[in-house]
Image (spheres, helix red, strand yellow):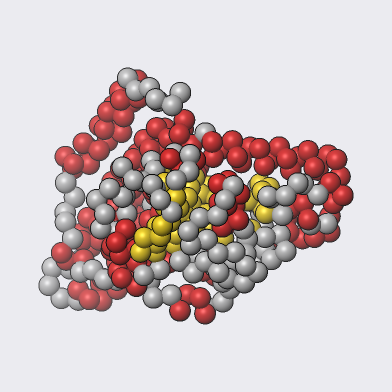
Amino acid sequence: MASSIFMVMLLGQYSTGKTTFIKHLLQSSYPGAHIGPEPTTDRFVVVMSGPDERSIPGNTVAVQADMPFSGLTTFGTAFLSKFECSQMPHSLLEHITFVDTPGVLSGEKQRTQRAYDFTGVTSWFAAKCDLILLLFDPHKLDVSDEFKRVISSLRGHDDKIRVVLNKADQVDTQQGRASEAKLILIFFHLTTKPVNEAATGPIGKELFEREQEDLLSDIKDIPKKACDRRINEFVKRARAAKIHAYIISHLKKEMPAMIGKAKTQQRLIDNLADEFGKVQREHHLPPGDFPNVEHFKEVLSGYNFDKFEKLKPKMVQSVDDMLGYGIPDLLKNFRNPYD
């Protein structure tokens, strides 16, 4: 198979070091890599192993049976024209594929100029990836509206996310305090240059270097943790499917038999948070398992509630049995081949 098993996605606003990070790990450039002070990567680039150095257009990549990207066809040709695969022979790429993403700009300009669902694409990759790196520049920590939506879409993938404050050793103490106040996250450090001891002091230098080593170790350990991560992802999807079935069944049940269907459907969408609460209380479900309300509203607006399926209790019971007994039994007899 031409594709690698494990994937790492890099997300961030422009000029935060996404492409530089990949080049640093590969110790070389790759086809399609562009670096500059202004936005340069305007497309999703999958960097993976291949016999020769070449770039493959997105429309071609999406229909290749030996690559795991056929699901991206749902985002249409507008997206596929902004997607490409960069192949090159490299020992690291035999194990890990990197997903370089477009730099996110501030304001509504970027969102309105995109002809495809940027947040939807990042969510698709997030579900497939083993590690997600959120890169920030300490000199410009204002998070754009689009980037906020992207970060929000990563809900449920917290265990995969590492936050990287690139060039953090180049920020003085006062700037550091302001940055910490604006971005309430655990910062990891990454730089392709030696840590600036003059700015950090000897203790800070040691801390930065340890954080850098931890981040690189996380990447190296991806194959070892892949089995647990795959099972974890499967369990999350199964729980999400169960919640989805309860929600859809509830909305169908709330629809009138004859008159006022359109008004009722709109009312249900407008008060979706309350409807989620009813489903949660009726079936004693964890609130944290429910999807994002605003995103679910957008999705529901394109459907007719009358055509939704009724709940099938036997199928829900099958999911519960699988989660309660099937998965634990599987784990007892499974050994990670990378251990």
Residue 338 visible from this viewpoint: yes
Numbered disc total: 0
- Tell which residue pokes out farthest to the front in this image: 52
Picture residue at 44% right of the left edge, 50% below the top: 88
Please give the name of the residue rendered at 80% of the width and 60% of the height, measured from the top-left corner. 175
Place of residue 156 in the rendered image (x, y in percent of width and height, measured from the top left) = 45, 48
Left or right? Give the position of 7 relative to 34: left
Q: Left or right: where does residue 113 sit relative to residue 255?
A: right
Name above or below for residue 2 compared with residue 135.
above
Q: Nearer the viewer, residue 69 or 158?
A: 69
Q: In which quadrant of the rendered view does residue 73 lie?
A: bottom left
> Where does the image place residue 172, in percent across and percent down from the top left?
83, 57
Q: Residue at x 49, y 69 (%)?
A: 42
The residue sitting at the top extreme is: 333
Q: Nearer the viewer, residue 176 or 26?
A: 26
Depth order, front residue of 92/270: 92
Is any atom of residue 273 visible in this view?
A: no
**Quick check: 79 above or below 180?**
below
Q: Residue at x 84, y 55 (%)?
A: 173
Q: Quadrant of the N terminus?
A: top left
Q: Horizontal and vertical percent for residue 37?
A: 65, 69
| Res. 235 image quadrant | top left
Q: As drawn, is 156 to the left or to the right of 234?
A: right
Residue 259: x and y in percent read 15, 76
Quadrant of the rendered structure where residue 80 is?
bottom left
197 relative to 52 in the view: left or right: right
